[in-house]
Image: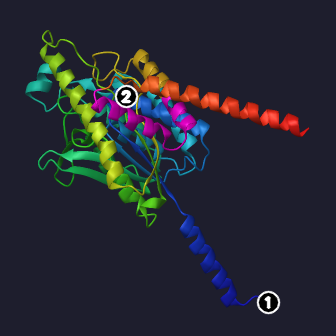
């Protein structure tokens, strides 16, 4: 008969072995307004192409549109991401402008002179409550926003909880784009707005929350989806730009440099983390001057780019898309003419040729052995 001590010893060894093999998988989703549709489609592609284990996220952090998408995925337990992706994409496909915001009774003038945002964002809160109200938070979540008084980036943490008014405050605050929407006054006396003003991707927050599960950063597997464009097109002549044209160009320049710095600085600060799939649009996702374009035409365009990019990321393997992105960024910084979509196409063609050659060689070896 096996003694109790032996049984306890076996159980202890087994638990230590399991703890040593434990990994924390995290997904980081950036802000981007209507471009959140790109994120939704990319996650859907990954759940179709990757194993359930590979897509079993323990942690999700989101900023702005990433907070919306994170709320959908976060309402499903690790391992149920396929269902969450279906629900998230289904919601984007059904989303209409009236579900996200509305005009104030006094129109734009009331928004500018009497309110703190041009539009009333209350429909979005009601919409989310309707879609997610009966569910609950099933993962470790981080929702990013900014304190207007201090300028501090804040990541509000949630896990194993019902969707409360406090949670909805954090989501709406994370999406409260300056000028467009009013900031959110929270129960702790803070006044919050879109976290993307400071930090479009909360990678540090995802790593921090993963370290609540594992002891070492080398046990963290992290995926991230960016929505900012990965290149900065040159403009020959800006002399005819209107005020809004100058504003768009300034934001375009700021967004590009800001997001590329986030990727580089994060890799330097956390060299032990396994940055698996770092995805960014291979072409610009902006096809109209409307800041929040929820038209079917625009959403379908974003879906198409996401399908192509997310599939490419899987084909290139862990780290492959990220390395292409960094190489592309380096070329741009060196003044070279570079396009990420063309780089990806060339790389995938080379990969297909290598696979075809390998298959042909294998077939020849089999024939010789016979």
Instruction: Identify the secondary structure beneath mark 2.
Output: helix
State whether residue 185 is above or below residue 229. Answer: below
Q: Position of residue 196 (x, y in %)?
A: 26, 39
State whether residue 98 is above or below residue 157. Answer: above
Asked whether residue 52 appears in the rendered view, the answer is: yes
Asked whether residue 175 appears in the rendered view, the answer is: no
Tally the marks: 2
Q: Position of residue 353 (x, y in %)?
A: 63, 27
Most common secondary structure along the magenta stretch: helix
Q: Residue at x 57, y 50 (%)?
A: 79
Q: Is residue 178 left or right of residue 361?
A: left
Q: Camera-side residue: 178 or 268?
A: 268
Q: Are marks 1 and 2 in contact (CB under 8 Å)?
A: no
Label of residue 35 in the image: 2
**Which image quadrant: the N terminus?**
bottom right
Mark sitting earlier along the chain (1/2): 1
State whether residue 235 is above or below residue 211. Answer: above
Q: Position of residue 260 (x, y in %)?
A: 30, 38
Q: Camera-side residue: 191 or 125?
A: 191
Q: Residue at x 29, y 20 (%)?
A: 233
How crowded is the residue under tag 2: few (<14 C-alpha within 10 Å), some, or many (20+)?
A: many
State whether residue 229 is above or below residue 107. Answer: below
Q: Single out the residue that lies furthest toward the front.
A: 368
Is residue 328 covered in magenta?
Answer: yes
Q: Camera-side residue: 367 or 225?
A: 367
What residue sits right under mark 1 in the picture? 1
Among the 4 quarters of the image, the one containing residue 112: top left
Q: Position of residue 150 (x, y in %)?
A: 12, 50
Label of residue 176 in the image: none
* Start-end of magenta stretch: 307-335
């Amino acid at each position: 008969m096996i003694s109790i001590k032996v049984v306890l010893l076996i159980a202890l060894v087994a638990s230590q072995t399991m703890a040593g093999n434990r990994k924390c998988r995290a997904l980081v989703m950036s802000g981007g307004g209507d471009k959140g549709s790109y994120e939704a489609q990319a996650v859907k592609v990954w759940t179709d192409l990757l194993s359930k284990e590979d897509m079993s996220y323990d942690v999700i952090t989101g900023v702005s549109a990433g907070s919306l998408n994170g709320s959908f995925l976060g309402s499903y337990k690790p391992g149920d991401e396929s269902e969450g992706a279906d629900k998230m994409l289904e919601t984007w496909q059904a989303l209409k402008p009236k579900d996200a915001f509305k005009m104030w009774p006094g129109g734009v003038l009331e928004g500018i002179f009497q309110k703190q945002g041009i539009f009333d964002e209350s429909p979005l809160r009601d919409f989310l409550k309707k879609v997610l109200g009966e569910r609950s938070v099933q993962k470790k979540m981080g929702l990013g926003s900014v304190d207007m008084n201090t300028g501090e980036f804040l990541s509000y943490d949630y896990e194993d909880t019902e969707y409360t008014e406090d949670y909805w405050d954090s989501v709406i605050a994370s999406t409260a784009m300056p000028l467009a929407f009013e900031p959110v006054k929270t129960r702790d006396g803070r006044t919050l707005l879109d976290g993307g003003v400071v930090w479009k991707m909360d990678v540090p927050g995802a790593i921090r929350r993963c370290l609540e599960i594992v002891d070492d950063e080398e046990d963290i597997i992290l995926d991230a989806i960016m929505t900012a464009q990965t290149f900065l097109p040159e403009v020959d002549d800006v002399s005819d730009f209107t005020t809004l044209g100058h504003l768009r160009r300034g934001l375009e320049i700021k967004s590009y440099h800001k997001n590329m710095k986030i990727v580089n600085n994060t890799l330097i600060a956390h060299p032990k983390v396994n940055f698996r799939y770092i995805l960014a649009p291979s072409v610009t996702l902006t096809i109209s001057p409307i800041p929040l374009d929820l038209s079917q035409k625009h959403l379908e365009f974003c879906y198409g780019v996401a399908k192509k990019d997310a599939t490419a990321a899987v084909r290139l393997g862990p780290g492959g898309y990220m390395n292409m992105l960094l190489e592309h960024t380096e070329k741009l910084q060196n003044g070279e003419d570079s396009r990420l979509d063309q780089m990806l196409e060339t790389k995938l063609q080379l990969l297909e040729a290598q696979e075809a050659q390998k298959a042909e060689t294998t077939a020849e070896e089999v024939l010789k052995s016979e």
